[in-house]
Image: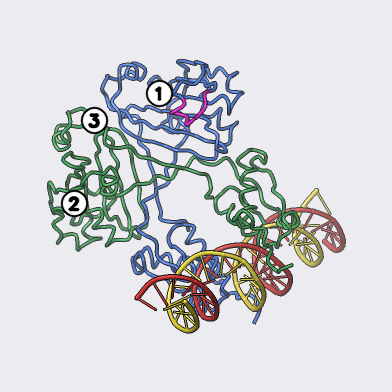
Chain colours: A blue, B green, C red, D yellow
Amino acid sequence: MSLVETDDIEGISLHQRILSDIREKILSGAWAPGHRIPFEHELTAQYNCSRMTVNKALSQLAKAGLIERRRRSGSFVGQPQSQAAVLELHDIRIEVEALGLPYRYERLERVKRRSSAEDRALLGLSAPGPVLALEGLHFAGERPFALEQRLINLSAVAEAAEEEFLDIAPGPWLIGRVPWSEAEHRIRAMAADETIADALDIDPGAPCLVVERRTWSAEHPVTHVRFIYPAESHTLVARFTPSQG
Amino acid sequence: MSLVETDDIEGISLHQRILSDIREKILSGAWAPGHRIPFEHELTAQYNCSRMTVNKALSQLAKAGLIERRRRSGSFVGQPQSQAAVLELHDIRIEVEALGLPYRYERLERVKRRSSAEDRALLGLSAPGPVLALEGLHFAGERPFALEQRLINLSAVAEAAEEEFLDIAPGPWLIGRVPWSEAEHRIRAMAADETIADALDIDPGAPCLVVERRTWSAEHPVTHVRFIYPAESHTLVARFTPSQG
DNA sequence: CGTTTCAATATGTATATACATAATCGTCAT
DNA sequence: ATGACGATTATGTATATACATATTGAAACG
């Protein structure tokens, strides 16, 4: 017999099989939260493999949050999975073009200023500094599709100060330039006030979907953006399959 | 010198350090998409460690999608990250209790019927069959917090037919019983109609956040639920870090 | 009875090694 | 040129081993 077991009949590696066996037990409810799963040495015997192989599977399950491991005590099924879903946030241009409509961006306002207290709160900045405040409209055909209100931290993205953003949206511009390491989204419903209703050509008080995003690059706040969609124009879609395969 | 290197001064393991060093290079833009990162044997030399240790770091980066690995060719920085965000959808009870308010669920309606065409469209069913239609209110203190409209496919969850759901919400009940393998969410804004406004004790036409979820268990549609939140009562939050830390 | 100490135990990380597998490159024959 | 083929190379998976570390449980001690 060769040193390396080749039970690899179905094209999946052994640690993957161990991983999915255990995941199955947990997701099916056979092993309830808090249940102690077999020790590494027991699985080693059960699968007739080395501890390293078992360890690889269990480490991955632990990283995914499905199990919790405690030295000397063993590994336990984690508490009810928080219902996390992967939310895809497409570029607005892509969304509009997916509707078969011509896309256009139009700048409404562009102000360079020292950050106000409100600016700093939105960006998550502690010290004052230069910011760029932008407002623009995304069109689908002739109809306004979304209003964008954005702050850019010029201390983090100095080049943005030179850019006019007349008909290119700041989103794509930033993506090409500043790699982001972290982002936070807030999604809510809101009634359009006079200004927003005017820009989006809807009735004041009409419901809107608001998506706010804060972005960091290596600990530095980069931008805060608020997209305001008329209720009819937008639905976010999120698909979810529990824990990676 | 001991067999195991103990450069573990800062409490992070070596493969973790290698991983975050490389991630840093990628996120900072120093290594652009398509750039070939050093071979395992080069990193082995650079960090003065074994190939297994380097491999562990690179495998994790690959699983996270930050790099792409090709046999015989090497490992390459992946293409621009798709803007996916992890959206946490908590149990409503948890959310309410996090606000420090007492939680209560109250059933408004419960109808068992043969699925209508609309029911089948919502659930994603092709053939007719029995369904349970539920409507209920989630309270935070004395105020309505969310209205829930739910369909349960009784062909998939027969036990639900016997349950009254008078003051236990169908969500937690289902989670304990039916493991779900897939879910789809739709999020949008909507104006409250007469019925909804009445139930939530808000003005007709007031903006609401609507979260709809369809759930499958092993290919079978299980349930469709629509949560309707008054705009003030709810903000979805999604945090995102490209590739886990 | 409470506390300290110590051995046992399960996991965490790393090593050196072995073989498998996929892709690429150069060589050689057609 | 072109295509077949084998050598080379980088990654993929697994093994056996070694030592670290946190935590538990029991024994020893005051």
Picture coordinates of residue C17 (x, y %)? 73, 73
Residue at the location (41% across, 32% down)? A212
* Disc 3 + disc 2, Cβ < 8 Å: no
- Mark 2 vs mark 1: same chain? no
| In the image, residue B49 lies in the stretch drawn in magenta | no
Q: Provide the residue designation for mark 1.
A: A147
Q: Quadrant of residue B204?
A: top left
- Bounds of the magenta segment: A120-128
Q: Nearer the viewer, mark 3 or mark 2?
A: 3
Placement of the N terminus of chain A among the 4 image quadrants: bottom right
SS category of the residue bearing label 3: strand
Q: Is residue A9 visible?
A: yes
The chain that hosts pointer 1 is A
Picture coordinates of residue A190 (x, y %)? 30, 28
Q: Mark 3 belongs to which amino acid?
A: Ala
Q: How many marks?
A: 3
Q: Provide the residue designation for mark 3.
A: B191
SS category of the residue bearing label 2: loop
* Disc 2 + disc 1, Cβ < 8 Å: no
Q: Quadrant of residue A206?
A: top left
Q: Dot 1, crowdedness within 10 Å: few (<14), some or many (≥20)?
A: many
Q: Dot 2, crowdedness within 10 Å: few (<14), some or many (≥20)?
A: many
Residue at the location (41% across, 66% down)? A76
Judged left or right of residue A133, residue C20 is: right
Q: Is residue A47 visible?
A: no
Earlier in the chain: of badge 3 and badge 2, it is: 2
Compared with D12, A8 (above or below) is below
Q: Mark 2 belongs to which amino acid?
A: Ser
Compared with D1, A9 (above or below) is below
Q: Provide the residue designation for mark 2.
A: B115
Judged left or right of residue B93, residue A68 is: right
Picture coordinates of residue B81 (x, y %)? 54, 41
